[in-house]
Amino acid sequence: MTDKQFFSSRMLAGHFEDLAAAQTRRYHYNRRVRVNLYWKPKDAFTAATDNMQIRINTGHPLVTKVKGRENRYQIVCGMFAHELGHVLFTDFLSVQTYHNYLDSFKWYPRPPAFRLAADARNEKAFWEYVKEDPKNLQMVHMIAANIANIIEDGYIENRMLNSFPGTLGYGLETLRERHFDEIDTVTELIAKEADDDGHILESILQIMLSYAKFGRIKYGGEPKTDERIKTVFGLIDDIDEALMNRSGKERLNAVNTVMIRCWEYIQDFCEVCKEHQEEAEAAGGTVTVAETLSEILSSIAGTSEVGSGTSTPVPEASGNGGESATAAARAETRSDASESGSDDENASPQTESENNENTSGSGETLNQPGNSESAKQGGGDSGTGKQQISESEKGRIPHQQTDGISAPVGGSVTKNSEYQREQYDRAASDIERILDNMAEKAACEELESERIRELNEAAQSISYGDIHSGVNIRVNRIASVDPELVEQYDAICNPLISISRQLQKSLLRQLKENRRGGKQTGLIMGRRLDAHALCRNDGKVFYKNNLPNEIPELAVGLLLDESGSMCSCDRCTYARAAAIILYDFCESLEIPVMVYGHSTDCYDGKNSVELYSYAEFNGFDNDDKYRLMDISARGSNRDGAALRYVAEALSKRSEAVKLLILVSDGQPADTGYCGTAAEEDLRGIKQEYQRKGILFVAAAIGNDKQNIERIYGDSFLDITDLNQLPTKLTGVVKRHIRV
């Protein structure tokens, strides 16, 4: 099996879907997350999610360049873990609200806190720029989204490493190691800028990403006083606060701060992008400024695709997550920042007018003393450099007074180079298991395809009579069950299976005795006289010995009318539910059962009887219960041909009792097949196969009950109340079980 087949298989996607379902249930929420794996080596896309579906390009060089399938699996698992982190912890609705506010030239959730003298001037220039040109606003939107994604990537990966230290955590850690290796050093970033292959804003964002995700910065040979490094150092407090804040809304405050603090770089970057776009237009290109900017930002190593969606995090997933998984690394970087003196530069206090007035003209009042909304919410300062603490926050420590994010208290920070994650060895077994499942599934699909061919050959070998002359017979069966059918079945099966289990209870004791065998006394007639019962006056003085019998001597065939009229009054829905209950009932009691539906169609200019095989006596893949979900109202009904086919298959069974149940809502109605002729055909089929030991039961669920009763006589079962359909069908089976 090739890597393409394995890493884009539905089996592997199902494995990840099961993992996702398990983790959402951990937070008491049964959100079904779909996983789409595909293989496109030339596509720059890696992975993304909209909170409902996770898409992963397993053919990306990030995966394919890794040696060994087990290692490649770990990378894919890490990509899945990252996107699952967004599903569990990212507030997409707040992000959407942020951009809606930006369109209205407002900050969300509140204006940024001004700590540097230049902040107020930058904010004023910011709003002037975005109001000047729609292109400017579009580019600012994209840059803000990129910054938000950087912070969110750091946040969700920290949460995932803390919450899932097993298989998911190891895969994510493996991916993170590869990402960190790919990040350029500051020296390399500066070199790219000199070669016009980069911009200082790109360098700042790359350094910011490195710190947000890993807590480390790859300085290269550059001093810590470098402009790019010092810019990020000045934002460390804001980034750390965002990374430890469980509110997606509050994390967006850091985006506002970064936008203002880095505004001069952002504005210059936007102008460069517009120049590139104008040059492309002059050369005859059609590239938009947004496409130009997006292409540039996508070059930042280690970033994931900016997610989209309008949903909130999984409920109960926003609680405390413990200490930061990268606390030690962040403490070292913060120490570097302290040594560089980054907080001293440009940190002059603001004037009262700068601090209290809204210089943006956006209509919002910023951080007024004694009336600061940000202070009330515990997310900002009032320009004094000291965080305000509300009464409701009680003993919370202001972040300005702490040395670092989740910094260790006492002791020392050491590295254990000998530690190995205990879940490491499971990767190989996971792959082996998935490969085995895939091989089994492929074998089942091949067997099912062969079965379909054999079923159609058997259909052609049957003599249907002159009335069906010239009519094609075609058997249809789903070779590989679609995951949607599985989801549909799982969504409705519980109450139906519960009905089946209740119907089985009355038989379990009898079946248990039947399997055990033994002496049955109190019989009126028999060959053996019970000497101990001669004193009885009722004549029940005989007995017999019952041999053990593991399997009831009964085989059941269910044939469903799938004519178009079955859609009326939910008849098809009731028939589908009855089939699910009856199938589970028979399977649980080890009664061989087959389920077929029938309708008509026309192809190649000829009438065709369409038979739909939902359940066979001998299944290959244990998926027949899911195939039952395909029962539908279709065309007309040519009962005779379908009834003969199922009766013929049932007649070849070795069981002593063979029961055929026909569920229909009316008489036969097909071109050249209706009225008296059709009725006589059905009576003839019934009589023919009754002689072969088949018992017929015709269940009428429509308004044509009298006609159906006239055709099948004493085999007629009237089901006026559709709610009684499952109970009555299983009741018929119960009566024919030999105990």
Image (cartoon, helix red, strand yellow):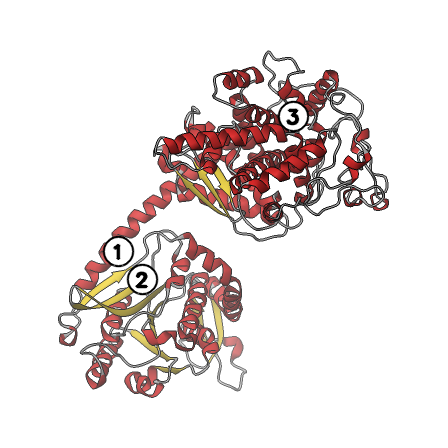
**672 or 597: which is nearer to us?**
672
Q: Where is residue 340 in the image (x, y as percent from the top left)?
A: 72, 16
Q: Is mark 1 on a helix, strand or loop?
A: helix
Looking at the image, is 158 positioned above or below residue 182? Answer: below
Q: Which amino acid does label 3 sit on?
A: Gly
Q: Can residue 257 be seen in this view?
A: no
Q: Assign the C terminus to one quadrant of the image.
A: bottom left
Instruction: Write down the residue under mark 3.
Output: 215
Q: Can residue 124 be seen in this view?
A: yes
Label 3 to label 1: alpha-carbon separation: 59 Å
Q: What is the quadrant of residue 600 in the picture? A: bottom left
Q: What residue type is labelled 2?
A: Ser
CA neighbours of label 3 inside 10 A, class few (<14), some (14 to 19), many (20+): many
**106 or 734: which is nearer to us?**
106
Instruction: Write down the residue under mark 1.
Output: 452
Q: Is mark 2 on a helix, strand or loop?
A: strand
Residue sitting at x 82%, y 29%:
401
Q: Assign the N terminus to one quadrant of the image.
A: top left
Residue sitting at x 36%, y 41%:
439
Q: Nearer the viewer, mark 3 or mark 1?
A: 3
Q: Position of residue 730 (x, y in %)?
A: 44, 72
Tell me whether circle 1 and circle 2 mark residues in contact (CB < 8 Å). yes
Looking at the image, is 654 positioned above or below residue 362? Answer: below
**558 or 373: which is nearer to us?**
373
Label 2 to label 3: alpha-carbon separation: 59 Å
Q: What element carries label 3?
A: loop
Q: In this view, does 238 lie to the left or right of 511?
A: right
Q: Position of residue 451 (x, y in %)?
A: 27, 54
Instruction: Write down the residue under mark 2.
Output: 613
